[in-house]
Amino acid sequence: MEKQNEKEGVNIEDVISKSELFLEKNKTLLIIAVVAVLVIIFGFFGLKKFYFQPRQERANAAVFAAEQWFAQGDFQKALDGDDRFEGFVSVADRYGKTKAGQRAKYCAGICYLQLGDFNKAVNYLNSYKGSDVLTPIFAEIAAGDAALELGDNAVALRHYEAAAKMDENDITTPYALMKAGCAYLVDNNGAKAKTCFEQIKEKYPYSTEYRDADQYIALAGNL
């Protein structure tokens, strides 16, 4: 092996010596690099513990009253708040990057949709980034509803069709398909509408929309 290494021009002792020399020369640099990594790691966990977690807790506290008003159907108060408590608009502005802030964006979008301010509804719903399974789908559908109210059927259909493909299930998928089918009916596109209603009929027999699928299929067939 020693002869082979010599033939190939490789001297193991030289390699070891050079490695040790490199380490010795760059000892300070390597220490700085390791310390930098540790600072980043501990800094992240420190930031999470002392900044993000308290901020999330403050956001949860801030949004609590608005969520109660929202549940009671007092949408304007839920948006604006009162003299004592913040509304969704304020919470979304101050804590938009927290989970509670994201909930505030979603609820603000629904409030504006209910109050007929469709442009604001679209803005809040499009900015919402939920981490759960269902609310991003409902936000997509609600954005479609707002677009439909604004007379933009093409955008509404994009939202409905996107929602129908998100985490397919027996609740949100047939609901989104029914919305899409009705939007196609508004566009007098019977063929596309019929396709949506037939998917409900074929794939989602346990859904609420299934009960009305036949009459909508017939309606689409008459266009």
Image (tube, rainbow, N blue to C red):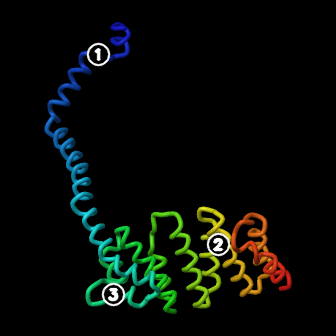
Which comes sooner in the sequence, label 3 or label 1? Answer: 1
Residue 161 numbered mark, or none = 2
Residue 11 numbered mark, or none = 1
* Closest to the observer, 107 or 21: 107
- Expressed as whole percent of the image width and height from the top left, the position of residue 59 reads 30, 72
Q: Tell me how far mark 2 sits from mark 1, CA to CA.
A: 67 Å
**Residue type at tag 2:** Glu
Quarter the N terminus occupies: top left
According to the picture, the residue beneath numbered tag 3 turns out to be 81
Which comes sooner in the sequence, label 2 or label 3? Answer: 3
**Residue type at tag 3:** Gly
Image check: 25 left or right of 133?
left
Q: Tell me how far mark 2 sits from mark 3, CA to CA.
A: 35 Å
Kindly state the secondary structure of the residue where label 3 is placed: loop
Kindly state the secondary structure of the residue where label 1 is placed: loop
Q: Residue at x 36, y 78 (%)?
A: 92
For residue 58, above or below residue 123 = above
Q: Residue at x 60, y 70 (%)?
A: 163
- Expressed as whole percent of the image width and height from the top left, the position of residue 110 reads 49, 82
* Closest to the observer, 57 or 39: 57
> How many residues crowd mark 1 within 10 Å: few (<14), some (14–19), many (20+)?
some
Q: Tell me how far mark 3 sits from mark 1, CA to CA.
A: 78 Å
Q: Residue at x 51, y 70 (%)?
A: 135
| Residue 147, quarter of the rendered image | bottom right
* Closest to the observer, 65 or 13: 65
- Expressed as whole percent of the image width and height from the top left, the position of residue 192 reads 76, 76
Image check: 162 left or right of 95?
right
- Expressed as whole percent of the image width and height from the top left, the position of residue 54 reads 25, 65
Q: Residue at x 72, y 87 (%)?
A: 186
Which comes sooner in the sequence, label 2 or label 1? Answer: 1
